[in-house]
Image: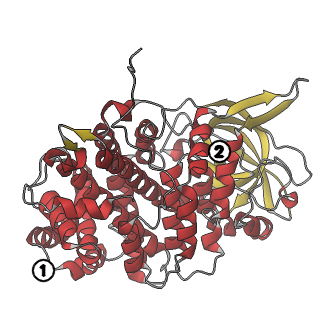
Amino acid sequence: METTHEVFNQPTPLVDYNLFDTNRPLRDALKFNAPALQTTQLHELGATLGTAGMQAHARLANIHTPELHTHDRFGRRIDEVEFHPSYHALMTAAVGAGLHGTPWTGTSASPHVLRAAGFMLFTELEPSILCPISMTYAVTPALRGNAGVYADWGPKLGSLWYDPALKLFSDKPGVTMGMGMTEKQGGSDVRANTTKAVRDGSDAWGERYAITGHKWFFSAPMCDAFLVLAQAPAGLSCFFLPRVLPDGSRNAIQIQRLKDKLGNKANASSEVEFQGASAWLVGEEGRGIPQILEMGTMTRLDCALGTSGLMRQSLGIALNHATQRKAFGKPLIEQPLMKNVLADLALESEAATALAVRLARAFDNQADEHERLMARLLTPVAKFWICKRGSAFAQEAMECLGGNGYVEEGGEGVMARIYREMPLNSIWEGAGNIMALDLLRGLRKGDAVAALTKELAPARGEHAALDRLTDALPARIEAMASEAEARRLAQDVALAVQAALLVQTAPSAVAGAFCASRLGGDWGNAFGTLAAGTDFDSIIQRAQPR
């Protein structure tokens, strides 16, 4: 018989490459924001994450999703979630890389920037297991509001050892933490929470309470402990709630079910009920909202970092495909329309990276008033804009692969997983409207106009469109009276800061095309509509993952 199935013109997968060494936008952002940063650790992490073995773990952790076991075979309540071994392999790698609580105890001069870069790299491999990693990062400083708990748990939250066993914290080399804030009737409006906290004595960890109620989204329920919100006599308060109590018994946390989510499949998100669960007050009674806002700031940074990493991953896959795949007589990457699309995606990805790393720098310099203000302003701005761009970005990158990008199989099948994952960071920790409102609150903290003017000043005179936007923003900020315009303001602040950063960190081909398209109006309503005179080749070459 004649051969009827010869495979050719199919690209080799993007595998066994160094995610860090090939990411020039990230490396340039690090040089700008943390010039003294030692990147050896990132080089080693990038090499590990690009291997076929780690990619297999990511695939398996998403195929073999978490399973809830509410009871053992004898009928005893156990409330345990079982994960595939690949999930634990990924968690071991993320904790070992210090992507959780280590910035609060590390010795690096720029611990938050270092951790941010590693978080972005790991997101390119597998983002959903980073949920407990992110929450551990966010809650660690909040625990200082309870000296007894922090003394016992703080060192273990910064440990580089991952132990998935459900046992007493003192018997574990390292621990992770989650959060339980929202309830079914309130969502982001946590003031509507009904879960009750009743005083139940005191001990070495301070004031102890009995918690009765529920949480509608309780992510990573197999963490060792959680910070939760509940209504105490003085109002909504923050509590430390461990899975295993100091006497070794299990706390009264009942996992009702796991969420069946669009994406984020490797991570277990659950609904739980507390049946008089023991918890300890963190901070002052009635001050739960300030506590959650502080933690939300950290997790919102991770939303921006995570989406930036997903952008980079999907761009890399699209570039890898277009470089090898031939159509109409030549490689896709040489086709003028495909060049336009890929270059446009590269601009968006680099701008997201630049803004996310800049925000991380602000967390490293909180003793500086300007940096404190920029953290307050850029956190909602970056979370809003970068995450809003994610889904459209993933769809366009998927389209570069055609039908191969739409299937759930093989290396290019990762595109479908990315596409499902993209909406999460926009929704989690406050959707777009919440971020726009948070920006308005931030504008009332200190001299926001002066801070933003200072931030944009180094790029003055580099591009006329950026100068026009820079000149217009102060009056718009001072006159901002309508919530209905808050999204547009968040968008324009994000674009202005992104443009200013690219002017300072990227080649002129990148910065010029970004300003002309995003700020100058020389752009359409979809990716791939850059002006014909754009230096497509230079932009694409800079973004190549090999």
Residue 343: percent from left, percent from top? 22, 55
What label does residue 461 carry, if any?
A: 1
Q: In the image shown, does 82 or 372 lie closer to the viewer?
A: 82
Residue at 27%, 72% in the rendered image: 506
Residue 198: percent from left, percent from top? 75, 47
State whether residue 60 appears in this view: yes
Residue type, mark 1 in image? Gly
- By what rule are the colours in the image chosen? secondary structure
The residue furthest top is 1
Residue at 48%, 58% in the rendered image: 17
Q: In the image shown, does 197 or 433 lie closer to the viewer?
A: 433
State whether residue 227 appears in this view: no
Describe residue 349's horizontal placement relative to residue 202 as left or right: left
Q: Is residue 214 above or below residue 208?
A: above
Residue at 58%, 80% in the rendered image: 108
What label does residue 220 carry, if any?
A: 2
- Find numbered disc 2 in the image and state the secondary structure of the residue it sits on: loop
Describe residue 352's horizontal placement relative to residue 283 as left or right: left
Q: Is residue 208 above or below residue 204?
A: above
**Badge 1: residue crowd in 10 Å (few <14, some 14–19, many ≥20):** few
**Badge 2: residue crowd in 10 Å (few <14, some 14–19, many ≥20):** many
- Find numbered disc 1 in the image and state the secondary structure of the residue it sits on: loop
What is the quadrant of residue 350 in the picture?
bottom left
Residue 460: percent from left, percent from top? 16, 80
Residue type, mark 2 in image? Ala
